[in-house]
Image (cartoon, rainbow, N blue to C red):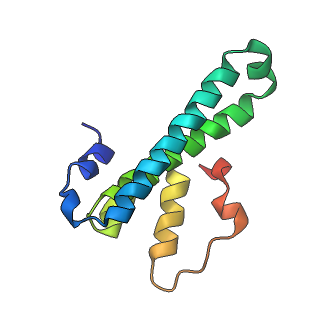
């Protein structure tokens, strides 16, 4: 079992129903993006010309899954962030939730940073 699945198994009765619905919506968007990336990647010319963009789509889907898992969890903020496997995202979340945190700049929020 991976660490993010562990969060999903926690008592969802304590998680805000809106958070659960938002997590489901994120996963729907993730599936749409993954299907799009697969379709585009199945054409050799498109794959060759847009490899970096397709990799960005994959990165976005990973980030969406991490957010969905966090929304579903009733674990502490620190525990949820500790389970995020995308280093850049985890660092931004830690910075944003630390006392006296300044808002992230646009370059700090770019998916390429992960």
Residue 99, placed above or below residue 20: below
* Residue 37 visible to the viewer: yes
Q: Residue at x 18, y 57 (%)?
A: 11
Q: Residue at x 27, y 52 (%)?
A: 7
Q: Nearer the viewer, residue 85 or 20?
A: 20
Q: Quadrant location of the N terminus?
A: top left
- In the rendered image, residue 98, in percent from the top left (x then y), is placed at 45, 77
- In the rendered image, residue 9, in percent from the top left (x then y), is placed at 21, 48
Horizontal side, residue 43 vs residue 111: left or right? right
Residue 26, placed above or below residue 80: above
Horizontal side, residue 29 vs residue 80: left or right? right
* Residue 84 visible to the viewer: no
- In the rendered image, residue 101, in percent from the top left (x then y), is placed at 53, 80
Q: How many marks?
A: 0
Horizontal side, residue 99 vs residue 14: left or right? right
Horizontal side, residue 61 vs residue 49: left or right? left
Residue farthest top in this picture: 44
Q: Nearer the viewer, residue 79 or 37?
A: 37
Q: Nearer the viewer, residue 42 or 110?
A: 42
Q: Residue at x 47, y 50 (%)?
A: 25
Residue 45, placed above or below residue 98: above
The answer to which image quadrant residue 43 occupies is top right
Q: Residue at x 34, y 68 (%)?
A: 77
């Amino acid at each position: 079992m991976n660490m993010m699945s562990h969060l999903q198994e926690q008592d969802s009765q304590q998680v805000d129903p809106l958070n659960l619905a938002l997590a489901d919506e994120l996963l729907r968007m993730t599936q749409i993006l993954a299907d799009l990336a697969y379709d585009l990647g199945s054409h050799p010319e498109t794959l060759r010309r847009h490899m970096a963009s397709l990799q960005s789509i994959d990165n976005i889907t990973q980030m969406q899954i991490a957010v969905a898992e966090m929304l579903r969890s009733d674990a502490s903020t620190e525990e949820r962030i500790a389970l995020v496997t995308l280093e850049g995202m985890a660092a931004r979340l830690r910075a944003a939730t630390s006392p006296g945190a300044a808002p992230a700049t646009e370059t700090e929020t770019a998916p390429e940073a992960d």
